Amino acid sequence: MNASLRRIAVAARKEFLHIIRDPQSLFIVIMLPVVMMFLYGYALNADIHNAELVIEQPVPSPAARVLESRLDGSPFFAVTQILPPSSDPTQVFRARHTRALLRLPPDLDAGLRRPGAASMQVVVDGSDPNVGAQMRAAVEGATQKILLDHLNMKPPKILDQRTVVLYNPQQRSALFFVPGLMAIILLMISALLTSIAITKEKETGTLSQLLITPLRPREIIAGKLLPYVALASLDGILILTVGYLVFGVRVAGSVTFLALCSLAYIFTALSIGLLISTLAKRQLHAMMMTQLATMLPTVMLSGFIFPVSSMPMVLRGISHIVPATYYLQIVRGIILKGVGLHELWIPLLVLCAQGILLFMISVFKFRVKL
Amino acid sequence: MTTSALNVRNLAKDYAGEKALKGVSFEVPRGALFGVIGADGAGKSSLLTILATLLDADSGEADVLGLNLKNDFKTLRQRIAFMPQRFSLYPDLSVAENLHFFADLYDFETAEKEKRMADLLRFSALEPFQKRRAGLLSGGMKQKLALCCCLLHSPSLIFLDEPTVGVDPVARRDFWKLLKSLKSQGITLVVSTPYMDEAKLCDTLLLLHQGYVLSQGSPEEMLAQYPYALHRIHGSKPLHFSARQTPPQGVALVYPAGGELRAATAKDVPDNDLWKQFPGAESSGHVPPDIEDLLFALLSRESTNAGQTA
């Protein structure tokens, strides 16, 4: 066997031993994706569901009764209270936990009989802009529809408008966050763990021993990378499995192509970690630098949460150098749209180029002296 | 071979704005057990790390095993070993796994590797502890394991930076026995230590102080340079002498040593009831100086000289 490859294998085996000798860290690395998926899947759901709604009703009336029961029956709202009219609606928001207040007029039934005569007010808590906007649209839309039904009327039709939602027709957020989590978790595991792995050798002084052995810098680095590629791949498989079993996310495209693209992304992420670890002197520095250089831009600027197109120019520029931006295009393309190399070769090429460049810089930067 | 193992010429190094080495020159013959002694901060670690190719000197030259330190460091790394001050093996790996790892990095045949490992385990008496994690070994055993890992590739020269610091006295003696036996195999050893009693075990010494060479030579040669006559002052109770007190008339230097005092006088001064000048003392007599006494004498002369020139 080639001597250099043999030394890489020896270094990789040693790194593998380090990983299994630290079961606590290993457990975290394996459980973290699962915990994060459940968090994103259930707790961090941005869609409104059972949002608290208070109705201000001066006089009981049939229309008000219908409105109240059908709003409460919808999955979006929970009518928590019916109040007599008050002069200051902000009091309601201060005193009670509610997302919106629907203020009905005293003459609702009479007003409804004369077109254009009825009026009512919707007061929305806008402190969370996303929830506020959703509440506003949902309450306005729902009341119109309920009252039209109640009057046995159909909305006037000015044009025949048909909207078709592709790839995620039910607009489930799981289909959106599972690919996103692939980008986040693979990066976190790969970059963070490698950045610590080499800095640890510096900090404990073992690097001085390694440098005197025949191990070349590129062999030290490659030996460090291999076990973490395996670990990150394991996490990728875990995310897809949980995504399928728990959240019903199927991979629409080729799983093999997804695996290949993910390996390219893992390689790029590992190279970021490596570069940081060749620069940082202490494990703590390496961890903080990795957080700053990977997690922050990936969560904020890759399009994981906020669309890149709505970012200001400077941030959009930065998002073009964040590897996750490209990986997200790929992974969403494969999982949701079922597209392949023909459509995704550009982001894949960028990702590979970034990985190779970063790897070469870290080999070049690796100091053969202390 | 005629070339020496180490030929160091005017080596200097700044470390974090401080001058760690201020132009150090010395030579070490092949096969020597060479001791670098000095207090903490004398520059021992910097010197050894530089000579072990792990740190660049700011100026000066050195030939190690006939190879230029600056230009041939890659070749040199195959022929030397370095045992750093801190335990630098993998604590989560067992004794055998640590040895295997380092052995596997060299191109040995399997049989050759097994033989070397078995020899080293026997040599270091670590055979019964092969399965134990390195982090759980005692201080002395850790150092033996580190030495074994250094020896795997049969280096001709080994640098050991304070190998016995933090090791109990029995284990220290054991460790020095191992060093002696390596020397008998013709391996050159360069050992730094802050312990003056270990200095006597070396063939040649380099006495470092604040980055420069205070004295060098064999222990006998160095002790022959001792400029005073040394007396022990004994009392039934422990005697004290503070550094701020002025020594009595005719005495150059007084310092405590294990409950007694040591007093250095000019060479021709007879003992003549010297003890009477020290309160609480009951007897006195000549003692031969050791390396520590020499260090104190040289240092006190340095500070006097510095005071005169200032």
Image (cartoon, coloured by chain):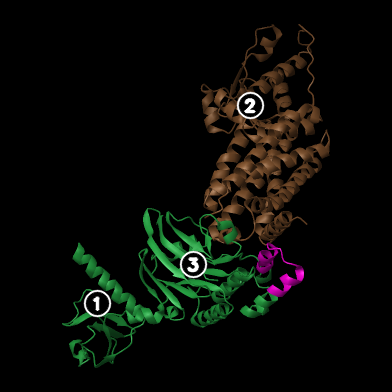
Regarding mark 3 in the picture, which secondary structure is present there? strand
Chain that is coloured green in the picture:
B
Marks 3/1: CA–CA distance: 41 Å
Q: Position of residue B108 (x, y in %)?
A: 72, 66
In the depicted view, which residue is nearer to us: A255 or B235?
A: B235
Label 2 and label 1: CA atoms lie apart by 74 Å
In magenta, the rendered stretch is B97-116
Residue B123, image quadrant = bottom right
* Chain identifier of the residue bearing label 3 in the image: B
List the residue tagged with mark 1: B242
Say which element carries label 2: helix
> Circle 3 is placed at which residue position?
B6
Q: Is residue A292 magenta?
A: no
**Residue A155 position within the rendered picture, expressed as x and y whole percent measured from the top left:** 76, 10
**What residue do we see at 55% from left, 26% from top?**
A314
Task: Identify residue for label 2.
Answer: A308
Amino acid tagged 2: Val
Q: Are marks 3 and 2 on the same chain?
A: no
Provide the secondary structure element on which disc 1 rests.
loop
Q: Is residue A9 above or below residue A80?
A: below
Q: Return the residue nearer the eye: A353 or B113.
A: B113
Q: Are marks 3 and 2 in contact (CB under 8 Å)?
A: no
Question: Which percent across, then down, holds residue A71?
Answer: 71, 25
Mark in the foreground, 3 or 2: 3
Q: Which chain does the residue under circle 1 lie in? A: B
Q: Position of residue B305 (x, y in %)?
A: 23, 68
Q: Amino acid at mark 3?
A: Leu
